[in-house]
Image (cartoon, rainbow, N blue to C red):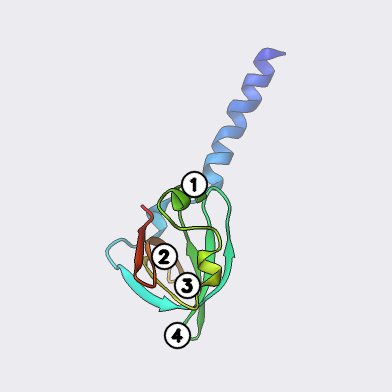
């Protein structure tokens, strides 16, 4: 019984690891910086997400884990209350309108997320 349980756990572990995307799908050689209104925020783990409207397109924004954002001064409702935020990060390599964020600027406050 114990061996079966261990085998089951080990068999499902790679699936869980693969379910979360890695950072290799983002192009770190092409940093981007944009200022845009936030249209949606999801505060959860493994990391938060947001959507912004920029140049007529909706961008998906991959944030940091919530505990890291809060520890560095980015509170849960700060993004949703902001008229616009400045985001610095990296776009997806495949051209999808999605970016991984390195830092967020709200007014005169910049929060490093990585």
Q: Which sits earlier in the primary sequence, circle 4 or circle 3?
A: 4
Q: CA distance from mark 4 to mark 1?
A: 31 Å
Judged by depth in the image, the label closer to the viewer, 4 or 3, is 4
Q: Nearer the viewer, residue 78 or 14?
A: 78
Q: Crowdedness of circle 1 by 10 Å Cα count: few (<14), some, many (20+)?
A: some
Residue 67's disc number: 1
Tags 4 and 1 in contact by the CB under 8 Å rule? no
Q: Crowdedness of circle 4 by 10 Å Cα count: few (<14), some, many (20+)?
A: few
Q: Which sits earlier in the primary sequence, circle 1 or circle 2?
A: 1
Could you tell me how many numbered marks the image carries?
A: 4
Judged by depth in the image, the label closer to the viewer, 4 or 2, is 4
Tags 4 and 2 in contact by the CB under 8 Å rule? no
Residue linked to disc 2? 92
Q: Secondary structure at mark 2?
A: loop
Residue 97's disc number: 3
Q: Nearer the viewer, residue 81 or 20?
A: 81
Q: Position of residue 69 (x, y in %)?
A: 45, 53
Judged by depth in the image, the label closer to the viewer, 1 or 2, is 1
Residue located at (60% from left, 30% from top):
11
Q: Which sits earlier in the primary sequence, circle 4 or circle 2?
A: 4
Q: Secondary structure at mark 4?
A: loop
Q: Crowdedness of circle 2 by 10 Å Cα count: few (<14), some, many (20+)?
A: some
Judged by depth in the image, the label closer to the viewer, 4 or 1, is 1
Decide: is 112 above or below 68: below
Query: If the image is split into quadrants, where does the N terminus sit?
Result: top right
């Amino acid at each position: 019984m114990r061996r079966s349980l261990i085998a089951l756990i080990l068999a499902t572990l790679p699936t869980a690891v693969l379910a979360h995307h890695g950072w290799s799908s983002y192009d770190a050689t092409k940093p981007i910086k944009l200022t845009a209104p936030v249209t949606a925020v999801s505060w959860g783990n493994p990391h938060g997400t947001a959507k912004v409207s920029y140049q007529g397109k909706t961008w998906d924004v991959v944030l940091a884990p919530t505990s890291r954002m809060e520890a560095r001064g980015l509170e849960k409702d700060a993004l949703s209350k902001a008229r616009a935020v400045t985001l610095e990060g990296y776009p997806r390599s495949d051209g999808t309108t999605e970016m991984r964020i390195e830092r967020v600027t709200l007014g005169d406050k910049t929060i490093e997320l990585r």
